[in-house]
Amino acid sequence: MPFARGYHIEIGGGRGMPGAGALGGYPTQFLGGGYGVEMKNNLRKLYGCEVHFSGRGEMIPNEDSYCEIDPHVVDQWGIPVLRFHFKWSQDEILQAKHMQETFQQIIEAMGGTVTHKSGPENNWGIARGGEIIHEVGATKMGSDPKTSVLNQYCQAWDVKNLFITDAAPFVSNADKNPTLSITALGWRTSDYIADQVKKLNVKV
């Protein structure tokens, strides 16, 4: 593969009542046009036979994606806010290209007709950063305070009473949803906090 890591495919489709705008793509899907009986026959070819695909892949950390304290903007309490920088690398773009090509191959192998696809003009349909809501990172967990924000128990190196147990400690995330891993890390962190409180290493 010309890209790192991998992705999974999510499939949807089936029958459903036509909704608002159901005929919006008719001219492009049936370029022959049609009225009356011809239109009805063409719609029968489409209705109830739709299938669509989504791809979920892993993003590789890169130097162009990071957050920092904004030097100019503050919140309503006068506290500086975070400023995020984000950019897809060629790994993610080539991964999306492979997804699109794979989706089309699956449809054609089943004898179907591709009615919508994305190409290089829009980065092969890759979503905007933050749109899928499975994003992780920003407070890296690691073993070295020089290269990470948190230790292995999601405890801040610089503020011992600060623990972060959402998706922020992840350096990266595989193509699967991160919720169960977040829960497991939170459980482990909770056990660690309880132990540290007993030892008077952490104040509550």
Image (cartoon, rainbow, N blue to C red):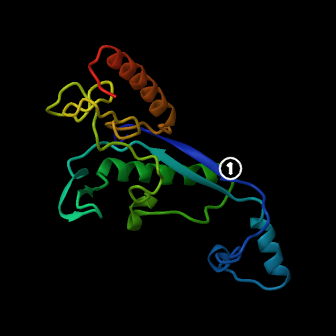
What residue is drawn where x is 26% and y is 27%? 151
State the quadrant of the C terminus: top left
Tag count in the figure? 1
Within the image, what quadrant is residue 128 found in? bottom left
What residue is drawn where x is 38% and y is 43%? 136
Instruction: Give coordinates of residue 29: x percent, y percent.
Output: 65, 73
Is 68 drawn above or below residue 145 in the view shown?
Answer: below
Q: Please indicate whether residue 148 sits to the left or right of residue 138 in the image.
A: left
Number of other residues with Cα within 10 Å of mark 1, as a class: few under 14, some 14 to 19, many 20 or more: few
Q: Secondary structure at mark 1?
A: loop
**Which residue, as the protein is rendered here, is positioned at the far bottom?**
35
Instruction: Identify which residue, 81 or 113, lies in the foreground.
Output: 81
Q: Please indicate whether residue 35 sits to the left or right of residue 192 in the image.
A: right
**Which residue, as the protein is rendered here, is positioned at the far top?**
199
Q: Please indicate whether residue 14 sits to the left or right of residue 161 in the image.
A: right
Is 2 drawn above or below residue 48 in the view shown?
Answer: above
Instruction: Give coordinates of residue 42: x percent, y percent.
Output: 77, 73
What residue is disc 1 on? 110
Is 168 drawn above or below residue 112 in the view shown?
Answer: above
What residue is drawn where x is 71% and y is 73%? 22
Instruction: Identify which residue, 61 or 126, lies in the foreground.
Output: 61
Three-letter amino acid code at the position of disc 1: Met
Within the image, what quadrant is residue 82 found in? bottom left
Instruction: Give coordinates of residue 16: x percent, y percent.
Output: 78, 61
**Which residue, as the protein is rendered here, is positioned at the far right?**
37
State the quadrant of the N terminus: top left
